Image (tube, rainbow, N blue to C red):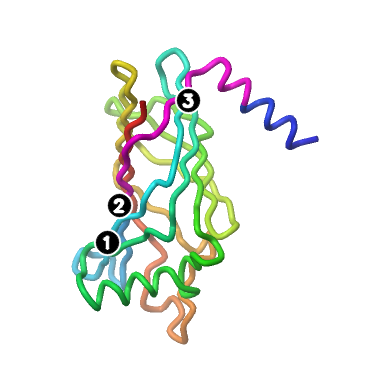
Amino acid sequence: MKKIALSLVLVSGLAFGQAKKVVSSDVHWWGYKLAKTEASSHDGTVTVKNGTVVLKKNALVGGTFVLDMTSINATDLQGEYQQKLNGHLKNGDFFEVDKYPTATFKITSVKKGANGKSVVSGNLTAKGKTNAVSFPAKISVKNGVVTLESDKFTIDRQKWDIAYKSTMQDVVVKDDIDLVVKLTAK
C-alpha cells in the first residue's frame, strides 16, 4: 500500500510539474588519506547513468539521478597505478560494484540559500543504505534548460558502509569524501 501511495505522489508531482532529462553531467570526487589535503588525496569521476529533474513554475522542485558506480575512475593517476586504484575502489574494499552497480540520489527539497544559491536536499542510496545529503548549488533555468552546479560538499562514507576492508581498516583513509556535481537537463 505504501508503494502505491508513493507512486501516486510521484506521478502527481510529475503531472503538475515538468520533467527534464539529464543530458550532460560531471560528478567529481575527492578521497583523502590521513591528512585531508590535496597532497594526500586522490580524485576522479563517476558517471550519471540517467536522471531527470522536475520543474514547477520554472523552479527545480525534485529529481532523481542514478550513478553508474562501475564507472568510478581516478583521474589523478595514470597507467598501472590508476588501474590498481580503480580496482581497489570497485572491489569489496570500498564500493562493491559487482553487488551494487548503481547509487541513486533523489531530491526531496530545494530551498533558497545564501548568495543566490539554493540548498538541495535529498536521499543518497549506495550499497543498499540510504542517508540524507544536502548541498549548496547554483541552479538556473533558461530557455527550457536546467543547470545545476554544486559547491564542493562532504559526505561521510561510513554512513553507507563504504569502509576500507583491510587489516589497516580505516586508519589511513579519512571518512570524508568531497563531491562536486554539475548537470544539465533539457
Task: Tell me the kind of residue under disc 2.
Answer: His
Query: Is label 3 or label 1 in front?
Result: 3
Does the residue at mark 1 contact the one at mark 2 (Cβ under 8 Å)? yes
Q: Please say if 11 is above or below 182.
A: above
The residue carrying mark 1 is: 43
User: What residue is disc 3 on?
Assistant: 54
Horizontal and vertical percent position of residue 1: 80, 35
For mark 2, what is the residue? 28
Residue found at x 56% / y 15%: 16
- Earlier in the chain: of badge 3 and badge 1, it is 1
Residue 106 magenta: no
Q: Residue at x 69, y 32 (%)?
A: 6
Q: Residue at x 31, y 62 (%)?
A: 73
Kind of residue sitting beneath label 1: Asp
Label 3 to label 1: alpha-carbon separation:
30 Å
Residue 139, quarter of the rendered image: top left
Stretch of the chain drawn in magenta: 11-27
Q: Secondary structure at mark 3?
A: strand
Mark 2 neighbour density, 10 Å: few (under 14) some (14–19) many (20 or more)? many
The amino acid sitting under disc 3 is Val
Image height of 125 relative to 7, above or below: below
Q: Based on the displayed image, in which of its 4 quarters is residue 11 positioned?
A: top right
